[in-house]
Amino acid sequence: MDAFMTGWLGYLSLLWVVLMVLWLALLAYRAVLASREEDTLFISSGENKTAQEQHVLVGKLERLSKPLWAFGIAAGALLLAIVGIWLWRGINSSP
């Protein structure tokens, strides 16, 4: 376990933690936005302001999808790289 705290694996592990924190923060922000979204049909002109607010929320949710995918894929790929390097170092180390 000490191998994850020193050298390149330590830096990669720290980068992975930062990516995961950012990814989880984006997921939490999306959940907050999604909880405020309503599936309501606005027909009267008096509800026009509420309809505009819902369109803004939907726009934010759509813009948030690409960063969520990017951070999720980057964190997963980095985790696979860390585990691969750790295993490679463990297999190639002399007993």
Image (tube, rainbow, N blue to C red):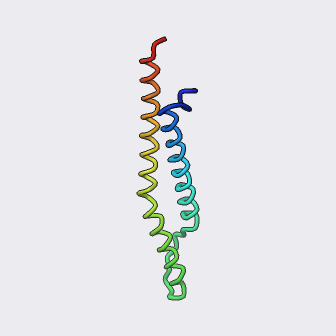
Rendering coords of residue 82 (x, y %): 46, 33
Q: Residue at x 53, y 60 (%)?
A: 30
Rendering coords of residue 50 (x, y %): 54, 79
Q: Residue at x 43, y 64 (%)?
A: 63
The front one of 11 and 84 is 11
Total marks shown come to: 0
Q: Name the residue furthest top.
A: 95
Q: Name the residue furthest bottom.
A: 45
Picture quarter with the N terminus: top right
Above or below — where is 10 with respect to 95? Answer: below
The front one of 83 and 61 is 83
Q: Residue at x 54, y 84 (%)?
A: 47
Rendering coords of residue 21 (x, y %): 55, 49
Q: Residue at x 46, y 44 (%)?
A: 75
The front one of 84 and 69 is 84
